[in-house]
Amino acid sequence: MPTRVIALDGPSGSGKSTVARGVARRLRWRYVDTGATYRAATLAVLRSGADLSDTDAIAAAVAGAGITVSTDPDAAGTCLDGEDVSAVIRGPEVTAAVSAVSAVPAVRAQLVALQRDLAGADGAVLEGRDIGTAVFPEAQVKVFLDARPEVRAGRRAGDADAGVVVTGADVAAVVAADLARRDRLDSSRAASPLAAAGDAIHLDSSAMDAEQVVARVLELATDAGLTG
């Protein structure tokens, strides 16, 4: 188990990816984007032709997939069976299916093991939806990052990784609807739902910029004795 772990959870658009990379960069730790592992797994399922209602077929497709994720906060990248799929996994097809694939308990078990392995042993910042509750419940610092729905939608509307293809005045409404759909699915799934750990620190980033949130997380890390 890594001796130093910061768990950063929260819904899409809360800013957790930017913050997690920033914290990892400042501490010179590993950065683990757990969402990328689920997206790569989803791409593997889609390419296998498995029915998204067939949990056994989904689990089999993921079990046979070779997923690797960079842990360098300055050089993010994801590969599937040796192919760089960093851009593909952010597309609308994967975005639409990722909640269904990530809800399969066998998939989550496999990917949690991968995520723990990616964390290494020298210090890691992991971001996702169940880091503090399922991946590293023993993490010394747990943060649940959130923001008002309209703020999250605005951020995602301007994010090239949002996975929603739409232009014009309707973009904010479409992104908001997609975020609400993913929140509903991720919060209601039986296996490791989106939820704050009981001992997590809640941070609302609605009125904070990324540097302010990074600074706050670093303060928490210092208070926990992780940066000495």
Image: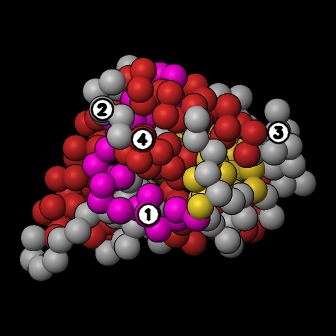
Q: Extreme right residue here?
A: 228
- Give the alpha-carbon distance from disc 3 to disc 2, as whole Å: 37 Å
Foreground tag (1 vs 2): 2
Label 2 neighbour load within 10 Å: few <14, some 14-19, many 20+: few
- Give the alpha-carbon distance from disc 4 to disc 3, as whole Å: 34 Å
Amino acid type for the residue under numbered disc 2: Asp
Q: Position of residue 11 (x, y in %)?
A: 39, 47
Say which mark, if any, is on residue 2.
3
Amino acid type for the residue under numbered disc 3: Pro
Along the polypeptide, which appears first: circle 4 or circle 1? 4
Say which mark, if any, is on residue 51.
2
Foreground tag (1 vs 3): 1
Are dots 1 and 3 in contact, CB under 8 Å? Answer: no
The residue labelled by disc 4 is 48
Q: Tell me if I can see residue 183 in this picture.
A: yes
Label 1 neighbour load within 10 Å: few <14, some 14-19, many 20+: some
Q: Position of residue 181 (x, y in %)?
A: 22, 44
- Give the alpha-carbon distance from disc 4 to disc 1, as whole Å: 15 Å
- Give the alpha-carbon distance from disc 1 to disc 2, as whole Å: 20 Å
The residue labelled by disc 1 is 88
Q: Position of residue 182 (x, y in %)?
A: 29, 44
